Amino acid sequence: MAQSIDIISIFPEIFDPVLRVSITGRAISKGSLVVRCHNLRDHTIDKHRSTDDTPYGGGSGMVMLLEPMVRAFQAIESMHGKARKIVLAPTGKPLTQKLVRELANEERLILMCGRYEGMDERIYHYADDEVSIGDFVLTGGELPALTLVDALSRLIPGVLHNEHSSEDESFECGLLEYPQYSRPAEVAGLAVPPVLLSGNHEQIRRWRRQLSLVRTRQRRPDLFATVLLSDEDRRLLAAWDDQQRDNRTAGLST
Ligand code: 4H4
């Protein structure tokens, strides 16, 4: 379990207001997780405390300088021990729940938040991983770092109380989560599925599994292709398809 996460950024002040609330705040206050934020500028040696410069070969934008990043990695590891060093950038491998679970097994993580038009490529000689939270370009790697810390904190034993158990969460079993409902039981003609009001826990379990399977097949065929279906899963999907076919025959909206 990641016991400590060191985050390196040119805006370290932005992390605390977010991390001190909710799940991450609980993990930190319980002592289950230590998060330290570092200012990359503290690892510069020029009088202007430069962290970026123009790219070799010309072109627009600025590039994060290699040496302050390497010095930051080295200073943090000399203080707190060797860590898995991760660079957040859109050119990295996609962050998935599987990767979050893998990173959660690391004792110490260091997260480098990219900025500008990117980082000197030689940083990957020092880093262990390059991770992206999605195929879009942000202004900085700080929100990706917060995203990763949030996802990691939910896997720390004892942090999620009676909130949703992480096993049921989307992606934990490779499927999207089932639909959720709460009060009122009906509003504007929109009723909660009767099975959820039945008190029959086995039927509810089956319905939730069925809806997870159906949703994943409909919305994320890429994920669905990787799921190992049990015999029960196949029966649940076949029953759903039969029901949809009957509804169409009866002229009911599916
Ligand atoms: C890095 C922007 C590299 C553009 C950045 C490039 C993400 C993301 C991100 C600030 C930094 C951007 N970080 N997941 N998505 N020149 N970071 O957008 O390679 O296009 O993690 S570049």
Image (tube, rainbow, N blue to C red):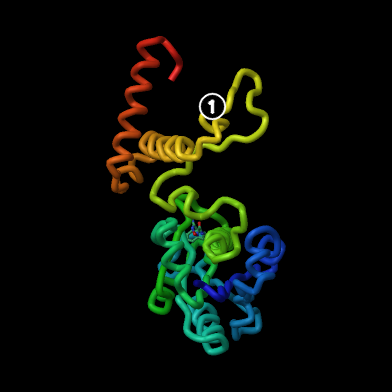
Asked if one can make out residue 140 in the rendered structure from this viewpoint, the answer is: no
114 horizontally vs 215: left or right: right
- Residue 195, percent across and down? 51, 30
| Label 1 residue SS | helix
Residue 35, position as x, y percentages in the image = 62, 73
As rendered, which of 55 and 135 lies closer to the eye?
135
Give the x, y percent position of residue 137. Answer: 50, 53
Residue at point 44% right, 56% down? 97
Residue 76 visible in the shown view: yes
| Crowd band around label 1 with a 10 angstrom C-alpha radius: few (<14), some (14–19), many (20+) | few
Q: Is residue 246 shown left or right of residue 22?
A: left
Q: Residue furthest bottom?
A: 78
Answer above or below: position of 84 versus 193.
below
Which residue in the structure is indicated by mark 1? 194
Give the answer, above or below, for where 195 lies relative to 71: above
Residue at left offset 43%, top offset 75%: 127
